[in-house]
Amino acid sequence: MTAPAPSGSAPPTSAPPAIELVGIDKRFGAVHANKDINLVIPKGTIHGIVGENGAGKSTLMSILYGFYSADKGEIRVDGKPVAIRSSQDAIAAGIGMVHQHFMLVDVFTVLENVILGAEGGRLVAKAEARARAELHRLETEYDLAVDPDAVVETLSVGLQQRVEILKALYRGAEILILDEPTGVLTPSEADHLFRILRQLRDQGKTIILITHKLREIMAVTDHVSVMRRGEMVAHLTTAETSMEKIAEAMVGRHVLLEVDKGPANPGAVLLDVSGVSVRDKRGVTLVDNVSFQVRAGEIVGIAGVAGNGQSELIEAITGIRAPTSGTVTVNGQPVPADPAKVRDLGLAHVPEDRHHMGLVLPFEARENAILGYQDDPRYGSGLMQDAGAILKTCETQMAAYDVRPPTPRLRTSLFSGGNQQKIVVAREIERDPKVLVVGQPTRGVDIGAIEFIHKRLIDLRDQGKAVLLISVELDEIRSLSDRVLVMFAGKVVGEVAPSTGEGEIGLLMAGVAKDRQGKGAGA
Amino acid sequence: MELFDQLINVLASTIRLSVPLLFACLAGLYSERSGVVDIGLEGKMLGAAFAAGAVAAVTGSAWAGLGAAIAIGVALSLVHGFASITHRGNQIVSGVAINFLALGVTALLGQAWFNEGGRTPQLPGSARFLDVTLPFADSLRDVPFLGSIYANLISNQSIPTYAAFAAVPLTWYVLYRTRFGLRLRAVGENPHAVDTAGISVARLRYAAVIICGILCGFGGAYLAIAQSAGFLNEMTAGKGFIALAALIFAKWRPVPAMWACLLFGLLDAVALRLQGTVVPGIGEIPVQVFQALPYILTVVLLAGFIGKAIPPKADGIPYSKDR
């Protein structure tokens, strides 16, 4: 399972490989991000790169795309060594990249985004005409239709991603790197993306797919390379391996991909959401008459593509935002629009976006360990804080949740994503809440930590707490929840059992609600 | 007919008063479209005005004065650029620092060099940009309406005035029709997109602040050696800030920027005209009312009454590769 030959697993072919990395090494201060990386990617293949967060895959791709330069090592494209010192060099070498966060100018049209940086002259009129013709060609060749005059911010996420791919192809990319491309897509949009990728491969392009979703690796790649702690630990041929084997190589030990849980034992209603609607300042309805209950001892999952009202629903439930109409009760008590008071009612909240809501990144870990509970008499009285008690709380939580490094005085921004999330989860769960609202508990979290967090959520359920889980990861929803609600355009469009097929839930998520429509509203 | 003449007079003075606003506003437009907030327009214009007045007084050449003004405008812009682009400093702090620096240094050097209480010596006509008379202006003067408009509004302005109004369509063209403009707009919205497209964010932003400095140089020169006959202490009198207000008013677009500057210039012209006059039923209107109007209008606009003014998304945010 561990690294075979350092030269990778490329089948012997006569044509030189599209990409060859030889002995790439990169340090950031004390962090050894890439250690002597060797990688061979044959032309015309889809190559997956997997690894936990902080394993070094982003650094490696950034080196390939000229964002950083390697301390040591050589990059060869089509057998010839190339020096890639900037994105410009990478583009010239035929490398294109679709970033996880799209590199698009929202207020520009598709055409303007495509020509940006590749205008080929001082005036834009000619470039636009040229791009228009070329887009038309790409559209017919690769099934990549998108209106060239549409303003990017009006397009769906799936279409924006298509614009990114078009940008790369317009620049003549022969090698396309995609960084976590499906994170924001519906299952059907992801399927469409994979069809496009296969088509591109069949036309001779080389695709590098960085993802943490093993299912996608299995579905679309030809080969897969696994990184762990800055090293390449395995080069595998997809057809000859399994998800379990890849996961094991990533983590370095055996992992449980399936969550191990017994049947739920629902008790009294602890969280009651009744007819909640949220409208924004412009009067747009974001949450539309949503009602459901969560009982003690069950996990209710809310599935849906990001941006369908889940975030606003969480805000209404946790008191961050007052609902326009409807009521929320926790343990029979109505929820006021004040998160601190909601917490006093016994509701804990792991926010969707830990960077914006869950943590203050420049703070030390010990300060974040009590964030939101700083007025608790345990941590001091009056104007004074009890530094000793805070430190002790943080140390206890770090030990219980295996936060690495276990250093309460370390600045939070210096922890990896998974460990940051553990700090948040530890803080919220250790308060022994009656109701836990969790948003995207494992976003940007590595497999080892995912397993850990999932186990904690199940434990909490078995202790008789009510858990509301909101996630865009359908796998996560299906494996953890006892009941699944699907949200689309602010409405709960259906309630399904977690065993329901991905396809059917996917249709609900895409708003193609069938006979189940409306059933969830009264659930 | 007398009312018409008065109107022409007010409009002529509107144009004169809006020129420094327009230069500063377009200067800010380039800078802010690239993502660099420039609260230091006032200071740059003041520094440039002093340079223009001083150099014109010493050399006796208006053009040398303009050159010096541009040099100082660009130099101060580069200080701002160095702080906010290269070192990713706080752009507001840097801009405020430039304002204070210009205020102090101009007064100090003015007194040290010319001993006239901070002002530069009175310039003779030959060392100033005087109003030019366009062809046929005199012969057409007596044609009713159009003749008067041509002779008094369009003709009889100084060279920097024509430059200011020519800069408006030029800026529009640069912004919306050229590669540079496309990239400039992009870098103010999403510098990451520009960087990944293989274009240097820093170089683009430096180009933008240099253009900003040149335009501030024109604005300062206009104040000291076209509108007046020398530099006076604090002669910008908040015009750099009004220009920023106009920029917001115009939603960072060149043609609306011109209209906003003309509107603010008009308020100024009306204020001058109404100074001391008694309006029946109200009494004497304090000048301050008109002086405050641009700010009041801007606040009203920002409160969302006239429409949303959305700045370039990356305006004011230093760029670093990692997010």
Image: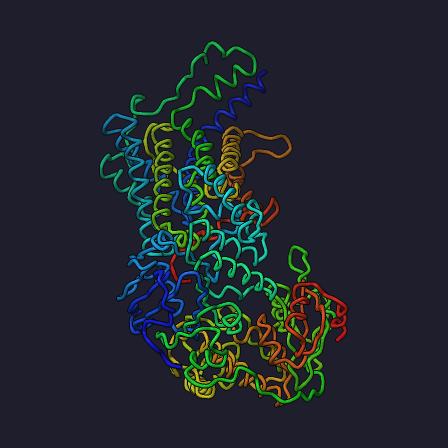
A24 with respect to A501 (left or right):
left
Q: Is residue A394 above or below residue A326?
A: below
At horizontal 71% and vertical 68% (from top left) the residue drawn is: A493
Please tell me how many numbered marks the rendered image carries: 0
Quadrant where the N terminus of chain B is found in the figure: top right
Give the camera-side residue of A46 and B77.
A46
Whether residue B246 is visible to the viewer of this picture, yes or no, is no
At horizontal 32% and vertical 33% (from top left) the residue drawn is: B231
Q: Residue furthest front?
A: A14
Based on the displayed image, in which of its 4 quarters is residue A21 positioned?
bottom left
Q: Position of residue A18 (x, y in %)?
A: 37, 60
Q: Position of residue A134 (x, y in %)?
A: 49, 44
Q: Position of residue B45 (x, y in %)?
A: 36, 39
At horizontal 65% and vertical 70% (from top left) the residue drawn is: A503
Based on the displayed image, in which of its 4 quarters is residue A334 positioned?
bottom right
A314 with respect to B226 (left or right):
right
A64 with respect to B289 (left or right):
left
Whether residue A47 is visible to the viewer of this picture, yes or no, is yes
